[in-house]
Amino acid sequence: MNPEYLITGLLKDAIKELYGVEAHENLLQTQATRKEFEGDITAVVFPLLKISRKSPEITGDELGKYMESNCDHICSYNVVKGFLNISLSESYWIDVLKEIVLDNDFGQQPPSGKSIMVEFSSPNTNKPLHLGHIRNNLLGWSVARLLEVNGHNVVKVNLVNDRGIHICKSMLAWKKLSGEETPYSSGMKGDHLVGKYYVAFNDMLKEQVESLVKDGFDREEAEKNAPILVEAREMLVKWEEGDKEVVELWKTMNGWVYDGFDKTYERLGVSFDKIYYESQTYLLGKSLVNEGLENGVFYRKENGSVWCDMTSEGLDEKLLLRADGTSVYMTQDLGTAHQRFSEYKLDEHIYVVGNEQNYHFQVLRIILKKLGFAWSDNIYHLSYGMVELPEGKMKSREGTVVDADDLIESMVSTARDTSLELGKLEDMSEEERNHLFEILGLGALKYFIVKVDPKKTMLFDPKESIDFNGNTGPFIQYTHARIRSILRKAELEGLHAEVTEGTLNKKEIEIIKTLNLFPVRIIEAGNEHSPAVVANYAYELAREFNQYYHEVSILKETDKNIKAQRLILIDKISLVLRKAMNIIGIELPERM
RNA sequence: GGCCUCGUAGUUCAGCUGAAUAGAACGUCAGAUUCCGGUUCUGAAGGUCGGGGGUUUGAAUCCCUCCGAGGUCACCA
């Protein structure tokens, strides 16, 4: 039984008995006792003073006395200021440990019957993934995992932006410059190859603009009407008309990009249940807009364009259909949301999208509400901030964008260098080693990014992230390997890890408390859609083990019972670490 | 200019629905340790929680205001 529930229940009884009042839930506040004080669980008595009409000290003492004599689990209490610190008996904590150990699905919540869709990644097909996408993918993936652990049925989807002027730019530059270069002929990853031509296009555009300006054109005019840009727009028109040659090239080049993306996704460890393509969904939503128009939710301007008025919500008006009847981004998102909610019977839909689109999602929700969809409140924009580097911001114009593949590769190679330096890998095969470097490099990256509150702008420092000390992925991986090594040695001695009636010291009770917190953290993190909570919890647990390990000798302990109990405790720590890191997609090594 | 988000040790981050002396880590400094100024261990210093006001027995947390940083307000996506 959860100790805080136990105390809350007792407190309620005590108040009723002593003061004859049924105390309201939110007056019964408990928390883990701070380290400086004696005790396990602390009840805050301030809120109860208006019931007792006595001083904090007297109230605390009366309640403590009642609880102590009415519950076998409580062995002592003390009152400091308005805080009633309660110590629970050793046998109680052993029972808690036993409960944790016996629960094979520890942390896994029962099925909720809810279906939740998580959309993340959502790349453009004109260039490779970069550091920003990494944050997106890692957040999306771990939120999806987190919701699964919370018992929900999760559908992971990716909406690929595969159409529009941007891909035409790459296509055009490829046609002009490449000499039919392919990923196979060049040995380049498909997404990088296409990205190369996107850059080439922009270089050509810049050149043309400069020369036009030199010839006396207005800069703005030149930027709009450079010949190559006109050509790209013509290509887009041809694409929309279904021009065979253009569509063929479009298919080929996008295919290269998808091959490239797949490799990056695989290495990052993310996957999707379904992939949507904008080329197939961009017409959705029009009928919804027309319906809204008929119902008077939207209105038409003189030139024929359709708008939604949101001035009563303190916002502007929003365009939904252009004068020529074509749709915009918002139109499509209205349509896809509607389609998904009805097709999958969703209870919730989470969009993992950068915070520059906060306004978009605010508007999306309002419009859906205006259209009368009850589920409009069940869309959630998981908004995340930019990732900056020690060198400063990434700017595509200045070419300081960090490529995802390059970054992953450099993380893994740094992991290789530092682990080789530390040694201890002699008895590993080449294959095992490479696997270790891979999970260390990626573990460093994933942990460092996920541990930060999503909505905050963050700074990614590769050097700091891969340090084996500190609040890092490798530290947790190292802790795990260390525990597994202890357990292997114990096994060689023929020892079994189990709960016994041995004694517990203060640190061990603390660890049991922390372990016991795991399911609570899972639920909390799920409600907040924030895997960062899980990451920081895992770090706390790992740090607790290291302190513990430093204080007591586990293998040298002579009492077999105590030894067995210590082993089961650390075994459980390693298991919970694995479960927590599994949510973030970090693999923990058996040795390193 | 309107709207949204953020501002916590030198740095990167925690701080749950308000509670005791605001926590880690890295860095810094001191001591110990070894072939070593690099590794490891121990310890210390370091904070007006952006400023001001308010609500409360109690505020980093809630409200108002100002300052600072970022984002966004397209017949772009």
Image (cartoon, coloured by chain):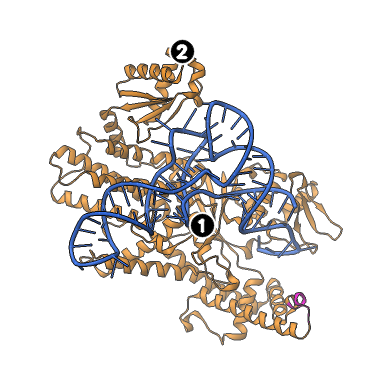
Chain colours: A orange, B blue
The quarter of the displayed image where residue A42 is located: top left
Which residue type carries mark 1?
Answer: Met
Residue beneath the point at 30% across and 48% down: A574
Task: Please name the predominant secondary structure of the magenta segment in the image.
Answer: helix
Residue pushed farthest right?
A302
Quadrant containing the C terminus of chain A in the rendered view: bottom left
Instruction: Please state which amino acid type lies under the numbered disc 2.
Output: Tyr
Image coordinates of residue B59 in percent, x first then y, are 53, 36
Q: Secondary structure at mark 1?
A: strand
Neighbour class for label 2 at 10 Å: few (<14), some, many (≥20)? Answer: few
Q: Position of residue A226 (x, y in %)?
A: 73, 80
Q: Residue at x 54, y 53 (%)?
A: A456
Q: Dot 2 corresponds to which residue?
A: A19
Residue A393: % across, % down: 55, 65
Of all chains, the one bearing label 2 is: A
Q: CA distance from mark 1 to mark 2?
A: 51 Å
Camera sees residue A542? yes
Instruction: Please say whether residue A220 is one of the residues in the magenta stretch.
Output: yes
Please, is residue A200 above or below residue A308 in the view? below
Q: Which residues are magenta?
A: A217-222
- Which mark identifies residue A213? none
Residue labelled with disc 1? A458
Residue A191 lies, in percent from the top left, at 52, 73
